[in-house]
């Protein structure tokens, strides 16, 4: 079994492991303390008592269908809201969203069904930069300065999935 993103050599080590976040993440995966802490933050974000930039994403697990929850920072950019995977393609929530064809729920006090649309890597750089302005601890996982020019974010954009949050729309065959 391999760990971490395998797409490029520049992502061989998580930059966040050099600081205090090493207690939360190791080899691009949450540690035991990270998993416990994430459960608490996820619960608080779902209640809507934390910063408006945090929400809880709920998506069906691709292996067993159970709902999985994770806390994420949401960023607004050019009138849309986006979610970014700070750990890249290996994040379980990214794998689950792809398997669920984007169908998910977001919670901040109440649950709302949404469709997450993956953004092409060519269009991710300005969103990644905007996300770094609000995700103050998450940005430490990216190997570029949070205030770098968009051109620098273009070099890492293939490695960090970005999803636009769209309202869920039932297909025409289900509406009467």
Image: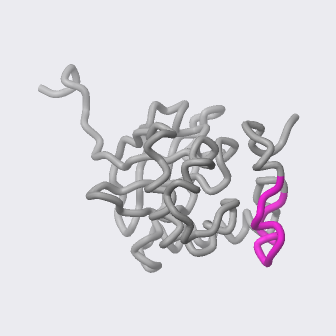
Q: What residue lies at 57% left-to-right and 58% top-to-bottom?
A: 70
Outermost residue, right side: 1
**Total labels drawn:** 0
Q: Nearer the viewer, residue 42 or 5?
A: 5
The answer to whether residue 163 is above or below residue 35 is above
Q: Quadrant of residue 37 in the image?
A: bottom right
Which range of residues does the magenta coloring cover?
A: 13-26
Q: What residue lies at 54% left-to-right and 71% top-to-bottom?
A: 147
Answer whether residue 16 is magenta in the image.
yes
The answer to whether residue 36 is above or below residue 124 is below
Q: Percent from the top left, x then y, of residue 1?
A: 88, 34
Q: Percent from the top left, x then y, of residue 31?
A: 81, 62
Q: What residue lies at 65% left-to-right and 62% top-to-bottom?
A: 144
Q: What residue lies at 57% left-to-right and 47% top-to-bottom?
A: 157
Q: Which quadrant is the C terminus positioned in? A: top left
Q: Nearer the viewer, residue 2 or 9?
A: 9
Q: Percent from the top left, x then y, of residue 141?
A: 69, 62
Q: Percent from the top left, x then y, of residue 131?
A: 49, 63
Q: How was the colour assigned to the protein in this rendering?
A: one colour
């Amino acid at each position: 079994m391999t760990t971490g993103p395998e797409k490029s050599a520049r992502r061989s080590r998580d930059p966040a492991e050099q600081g205090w976040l090493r207690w939360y993440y190791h080899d691009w995966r949450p540690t035991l303390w990270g998993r416990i802490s994430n459960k608490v933050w996820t619960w608080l974000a779902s209640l809507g008592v934390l910063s408006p930039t945090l929400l809880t994403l709920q998506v069906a697990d691709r292996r067993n269908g159970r709902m999985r929850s994770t806390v994420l920072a949401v960023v607004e950019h050019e009138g849309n809201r986006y979610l970014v995977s700070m750990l890249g393609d290996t994040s379980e929530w990214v794998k689950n969203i792809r398997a669920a064809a984007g169908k998910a729920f977001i919670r901040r006090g109440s649950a709302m069904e949404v469709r997450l649309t993956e953004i092409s890597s060519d269009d991710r750089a300005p969103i990644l930069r905007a996300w770094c302005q609000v995700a103050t601890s998450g940005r430490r996982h990216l190997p570029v300065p949070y205030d770098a020019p968009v051109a620098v974010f273009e070099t890492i954009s293939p490695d960090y999935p970005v999803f636009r949050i769209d309202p869920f729309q039932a297909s025409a065959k289900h509406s009467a």
